[in-house]
Image (cartoon, rainbow, N blue to C red):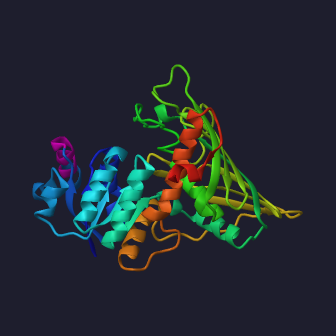
Amino acid sequence: MARVIQVGLGLWGLNWAEEVFPQVPAAEPVALVDPSPEALERAQASLGVAPSACFASLNDALKVVEADLVIATVRTQAHHPVVMEALEAGFHVLVEKPFASTIAEAEEMVAAAEAAGRVLMVNQNYRFHPAPIHVAELVARRALGRVNLVSLDFRRHGPSQGYRYWDMPHPLIADMSIHHFDLMRMVLGSDPRRVTCRTWNFGGTPFVYDPLGVATVEFEDASMVSYRGSWVSGGENTAWAGEWAMDCAEGEIRWMSRDHDRGLVLNPDRVTVKRLGEPASAPKLPPLEFVDRAGSLAAMLEAIEGREPPRFSSGRDNLMSLALVEAAILSAARDGEWVDIAEIFA
């Protein structure tokens, strides 16, 4: 049993407390932290938590409770101070994506975790679904030969689907595409080399910053990903993980994952494999014990116990996903100029 302090009880943080912890009995919440009295009152009413387990700061909680793990479900700008405080106090940390506001902040957190001998994980919850896991295994054993080209589309209409962070910088690339970029790395088993990206907005959207974008990502294994994303699509929704078409030397893999809407699972993950000259087939995907954020939390508990699971999104691993986000944003600022990932780390 791991004792957990959760920091951050906004709408997403409260959803974590309501929906995720009950799915992972080995994680025991012992304290909730938020500087907002209203947020703490909402949590007490919704969860039945005693006021004595609610605190205005992590420092206040540390004076009263004993814990093993801190989960940071605060806004991105607060990740660095909360994570650093937790690591310095000797805790393992699971932090929401995007990992940090900058690569420099992320690298500092990774270094602090390694110096302290603590586990630092980023919640890349899209990794914990059957389709991407199965496809990653197909690619790893070259079941259809090498991957040449990947086409990936994401379409959602944020204004009608509960999105509310209208003033967030880079709402597509930093807040949403981070999931897709991270899945690219996981599924291809390769890291990005460079990216070209364009983003834009148009009159009449509630977004202050660009909710649409296109990018081409070149990977170290020479595969290419063509990516198109929209938070203001008037077309048919894709699943949250997007629609993937992977052109391989000996056939094609099409898949989709995380077809959810307001917590409701509409369709299970789907994978279709078509080998050259053969009819398409849909392999049966084995169920996972823990899915999505519950999968992240369960993986974190394994890592704390010294059994880091496959596809674990450690802080160090996630630096490359964050670097791809930063490179795409930089490319967009340069009117689509190619940006090398090495430049971001430099």
Residue at x 83% of width, y 64% of height: 250
Q: How far across and how far down the image is residue 175, in percent?
A: 47, 44
Q: How far across and how far down the image is residue 211, in percent?
A: 53, 33
Q: How far across and how far down the image is residue 143, in percent?
A: 75, 71
**Extreme-right residue of the structure:** 277
**Extreme-front residue of the structure:** 346
Q: Quadrant of the N terminus?
A: bottom left
- Viewer-side residue, 89 vs 155: 89
- Viewer-side residue, 77 vs 345: 345
Residue at x 43% of width, y 37% of height: 163
Please say if 98 is above or below 67: above
Please say if 214 is above or below 289: above
- Viewer-side residue, 107 vs 214: 107
Please check the rendered image and state whether residue 121 is part of the magenta-colored stretch, yes or no: no
Residue at x 18% of width, y 41% of height: 38
Main structural element of the magenta stretch: helix, strand or loop? Answer: helix
Please say if 25 is above or below 224: below
Q: Is residue 177 visible?
A: no
**Extreme-bottom residue of the structure:** 306
Residue at x 71% of width, y 73% of height: 141
Please check the rendered image and state whether residue 37 is part of the magenta-colored stretch, yes or no: yes
Q: How far across and how far down the image is residue 130, in percent?
A: 57, 65
Figure disc tally: 0
Residue 35 as seen in the image, left or right of residue 328: left
The stretch in magenta equals: 36-44
Q: Is residue 326 visible?
A: yes
Residue 131 as seen in the image, left or right of residue 317: right
